[in-house]
Amino acid sequence: MNMLFTWDTNNLCIVFRQWHVRGTASLVFSLLAVIAISAGYEALREGIRRYESSVAAKQDAAPTVQRLPYNYKVETNTESATLLGVGRSSQADAIGRRAHVFKSVLYGVQNFYAFMLMLLFMTYNGFVMIAVAIGAGLGYYFFGSHTKATKETACH
């Protein structure tokens, strides 16, 4: 694997041994695939944002009991103490627990996807790097209408 920046496309291997560029046609199809993969990452991010918004809306719509401050002391040794605790909504908590499991899976998928894009970029081939950037731009254009263009690098 070449570890220096290059524009050379002869015998270019992209991530997998089976993904080999051997001519002009395979280069064009590979670059289009890289653009689609990169745009797909933005689609995944938008899908995750929509899921998180819908979960937040469901939690807000869930019936709640009176909320008390977090540090409020509730006497639990009396007959009048509630079994579930004051200020808790079991329905909202259940939604939150299920959603957290699914969001954790989505977070793992998103990070895997991001690192695969990084591997595409690390072919150090100028054409592939530009294709990743074009795909990210197109993905943001089509799927990122609800986000700011400036985002910290640490936020995948």
Image (spheres, rainbow, N blue to C red):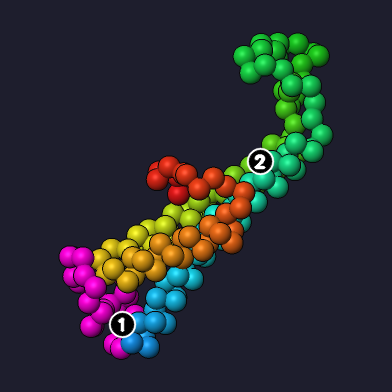
The CA span between labels 2 and 1 is 45 Å
Mark 1, residue position = 20
**In magenta stretch: residue 15:** yes
Q: Earlier in the sequence, mark 2 or mark 1?
A: 1
Q: Name the residue rendered at 57%, 54% in the picture.
A: 144
Asked if the magenta segment contains residue 50, the reply would be no
Q: Which x, y percent locates residue 103?
A: 57, 49
Q: Where in the figure is residue 28, as x and y percent of width and height?
A: 39, 82
Q: Amino acid at mark 2?
A: Gly
Q: Is residue 9 left or right of residue 146?
A: left
Helix, strand or loop for the magenta stretch, by majority:
loop
Q: Answer with the quarter of the image where residue 30 lies.
A: bottom left
Residue 11 lies, in percent from the top left, at 23, 83
Residue span colored magenta: 1-23
Is 1 displayed left or right of 24 in the figure?
left
* Residue carrying label 2: 96
Query: Secondary structure under badge 2?
Result: helix
Picture quadrant where residue 119 is located: bottom left
Any part of residue 64 in sight: yes
Q: Residue at x 82, y 34 (%)?
A: 63
Is 129 rendered above or below residue 110? Answer: below
Quarter location, residue 12: bottom left
Badge 2 vs badge 1, beta-carbon distance below 8 Å: no
Indicate the amino acid at tag 1.
His
Categorize mark 2 by other alpha carbons within 10 Å: few (<14), some (14-19), many (20+): some
